[in-house]
Image: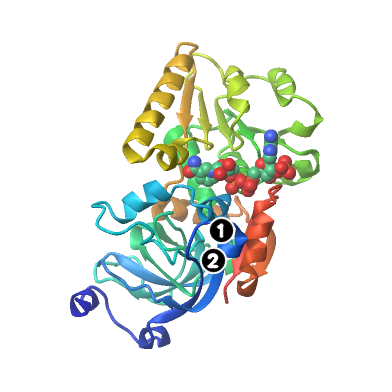
Amino acid sequence: LVCSMRAHYRSFSFSASLRNVMPAWVIDRYGKNEVLRFTKNAALPIIQYPNEVTVKVHAAGLNPIDISMRGGYGAATMAMKRDPLNMKQSGSEFPLILGRDVSGEIMECGLDVNYFKPGDQVWAAIPPWKQGSLAEFVVLSANEVSHKPKSLRHVEAASIPYVAATAWSAIVNTGGLNKDNSSKKRVLVLGGSGGVGTLAIQMVKAWGVHVTVTCSQNAEQLVRDLGADDVVDYTAGPVENKLQTLQKFDLILDNIGGESEKWALDLLKPWNGAKYVTLVTPFLHNTDLLGLADGMMQSGVTIGCKVLKHLRKGVHYRWGFFAPSGPTLDEISEMVDAGKVRPVVEEVFSFAQVPQGFQKVEQGHARGKTVVSII
Ligand code: NDP
């Protein structure tokens, strides 16, 4: 077996291949911050398919999903993705490595990988069912990886992939905007000061969109610097009252969810193809609670009812999801090197300080991103 795995990648010498363990932060069960455990003996990930690459992690970004996954969020769906035939015992995902953003260097390439070579500086957003980046190495499919922007250091680059891939998936794939059809359109970003918001504002601004943002008063300057045209302080009273006085929107990206669904769709231009895309969905919660089949059915019924209800008023209701994609990151990389998108790094923690990094993200009130410098 080992021989057949080895046959899938070009071997070259690096010190890690001489040992089969690496340093990493792992969890062995779900829970609060105390489940995070540092080990020097995590299994070294190896290339198993010819389209995979090994990346040496220089920096890892943290996201709210790391906090949720630490507590077991999405475990049912992730178990299905990791083990579609359900052959393994429950708990086989442990020791689990969190961390969805990586910026680093290609160490090894599977035999089918032509786009990368060892030594390439890359970045990637890691699908939640794969081992994460809070470790010395991570193995990814080459189509999830992209050359990192030349203008960024690794700690800056690691702040971008997961939120960029999410914003792109929601705005482009689900929302239908792109660089060629966005000029003068009006976009509302609910919750502009966190990871997804700070990236989304810059992305659509670069395409000539008029951007309205909701955030706390003390984040106004930040979002204006990123390109927001109108800013509404949600702490100053019901935000919908102020938003209703503005021109209607072509697209709403909702990073907040909850009550906002009740009024946000009234802010869209009716009968004009306008869309509301929310990132706060019950999809994984439903499968955690009801199991895969019933959970997915429940989600299908919920989204179906909401889509129909709003369609009758001439507006489109959608759920947005993170989608890993190297080609998307190639586009973002170009935007970064062209000066159109910049990283917003709020705080950098060392590898030894991963639990403090989790605490910071868990406290909320993000102003951009929290990053861990691994080397
Ligand atoms: P962050 O924690 O980085 O940012 C959230 C931001 O919203 C903070 O800056 C917070 O600051 C602000 N905020 C909180 N309440 C409000 C409010 N009522 N109105 C306006 N702003 C508010 O999260 P992310 O940007 O990374 O993610 C946003 C959401 O999207 C999260 O719920 C996340 O779980 C979800 N998500 C979903 C994905 C999917 O695949 N469906 C993928 C990625 C993210 P303050 O409290 O100081 O105002």
For marks 2 and 1, the one nearer the N-term is 2
Kindly tell me whether residue 81 is visible in this rendering: yes
Kindly tell me whether residue 178 is visible in this rendering: no
Q: In the rendering, at what x and y percent does residue 142 appear?
A: 34, 62
- Mark 2 nearby-residue class (10 Å; few <14, some 14–19, many ≥20): some
**Which SS class for mark 1?**
helix
Left or right: where 367 falls relative to 74: right
- Corner quadrant of residue 22: bottom left
- Corner quadrant of residue 140: bottom left
* Residue at numbered disc 2: 150
Whether disc 2's CB lies below 8 Å from ligand 1 is answered no
Question: Residue 337: which disc?
Answer: 1
Question: Residue 142: which disc?
Answer: none
Q: Nearer the viewer, residue 245 or 3?
A: 3
Q: Nearer the viewer, residue 222 or 7?
A: 7
Circles 2 and 1: CB atoms closer than 8 Å: yes
Q: Nearer the viewer, residue 241 or 269?
A: 241
Question: Splitting the image into four quadrants, where does ligand 1 fall?
Answer: top right
Residue depicted at 65% across the width and 38% down the height = 191
Give the residue type that dot 1 points to: Asp
- Corner quadrant of residue 296: top left
Left or right: where 250 falls relative to 126: right
**Which SS class for mark 2?**
loop
Residue depicted at 51% across the width and 66% down the height = 103
Residue depicted at 50% across the width and 37% down the height = 171
